[in-house]
């Protein structure tokens, strides 16, 4: 019985440069791209570097680009890919390459530090807080983020233009989770407008398309934040109301 095989073209290199190297791997039922990479490590070249942890789509570690599309390697089944030609596996292009498929994503953690922390309301007399299930449901979606940074990788503003000025979709999601939280009292709209540059997002929805947790990033996080910015800073009726009421 002949074992079916697939060809992979895997990026090998570091910050100084690299190339795609071709490997042949055996196929088995339920196989994912990360399995193929592990086969190459075990049988072909144990110097191949890849970041991974849970292999269950929950840690966000094995992010990369498969056939040019940002994906989690552990959640990309081989049988969903065209096997009549080599499968290309590359590191995320938005971040600096450390080695092979491993990128330096520390920029994201530095950006995260710039977001003002959750600032809760004063509790009620009995020491508790109360809010509706509807309010809870609105922000719960954003808590599903596994910080794979695929949305950051696919964002063309970060990849090609304004990485030092724009926070990217992952952190607009975090800002939305705070701004829309029923108990939070901090005002982050000036920062969202001027420091995190939400105006640079042109809502192409590519970030929503690549999210492995199916967070509706554009419609449920970014657009509502944009609406709040417009209402406060650019809506003449809202500005008049704020002037009259002081709110």
Image (cartoon, rainbow, N blue to C red):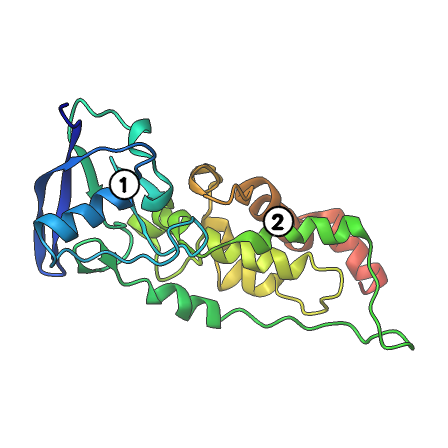
Left or right of 216: which side holds 244? right
SS for callout 1 = helix
> What residue is shown with label 2?
141
> What residue is shown with label 1?
33
Q: Is residue 233 visible?
A: yes
Q: Nearer the viewer, residue 90 or 182?
A: 90
Image quadrant holding the N terminus, namely: top left
Give the number of marks: 2
Could you classify mark 2 by the number of other residues whose Cα lies within 10 Å: few (under 14), some (14-19), or many (20 or more)? Answer: some
- The residue drawn where x is 51% and y is 62% is 194
Left or right of 231: which side holds 175? left
| Residue 70 location (% of width, % of height) | 33, 42
State the image quarter where residue 148 is shown: bottom left
Residue 148 to residue 79: above or below:
below
| Residue 224 location (% of width, % of height) | 63, 46
Left or right of 136: which side holds 117? left
Could you classify mark 1 by the number of other residues whose Cα lies within 10 Å: few (under 14), some (14-19), or many (20 or more)? Answer: many
């Amino acid at each position: 019985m002949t074992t079916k095989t697939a060809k992979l073209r895997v990026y090998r290199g570091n910050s100084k440069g690299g190339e795609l190297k071709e490997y042949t791997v055996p196929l088995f039922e339920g196989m994912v791209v990360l399995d193929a990479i592990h086969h190459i490590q075990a049988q072909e070249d144990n110097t191949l570097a890849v970041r991974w942890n849970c292999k269950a789509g929950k840690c966000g570690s094995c992010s990369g680009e498969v056939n040019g599309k940002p994906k989690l390697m552990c959640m990309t089944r081989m049988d969903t890919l065209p096997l009549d030609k080599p499968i290309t596996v590359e590191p995320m292009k938005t971040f600096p390459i450390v080695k092979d498929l491993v990128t330096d994503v520390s920029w994201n953690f530095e950006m995260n530090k710039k977001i003002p922390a959750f600032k809760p309301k004063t509790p009620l007399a009995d020491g508790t807080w109360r809010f509706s299930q509807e309010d809870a449901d609105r922000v719960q979606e954003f808590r599903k983020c596994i910080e794979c940074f695929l949305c950051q990788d696919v964002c063309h503003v970060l990849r090609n233009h304004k990485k030092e000025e724009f926070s990217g979709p992952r952190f607009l999601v975090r800002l939305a989770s705070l701004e829309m939280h029923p108990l939070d009292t901090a005002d982050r709209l000036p920062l969202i407008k001027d420091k995190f540059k939400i105006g640079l997002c042109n809502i192409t929805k590519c970030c929503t398309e690549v999210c492995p947790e199916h967070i509706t990033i554009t419609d449920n996080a970014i657009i509502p934040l944009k609406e709040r910015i417009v209402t406060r800073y650019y809506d003449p009726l809202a500005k008049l109301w704020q002037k009259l009421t002081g709110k």
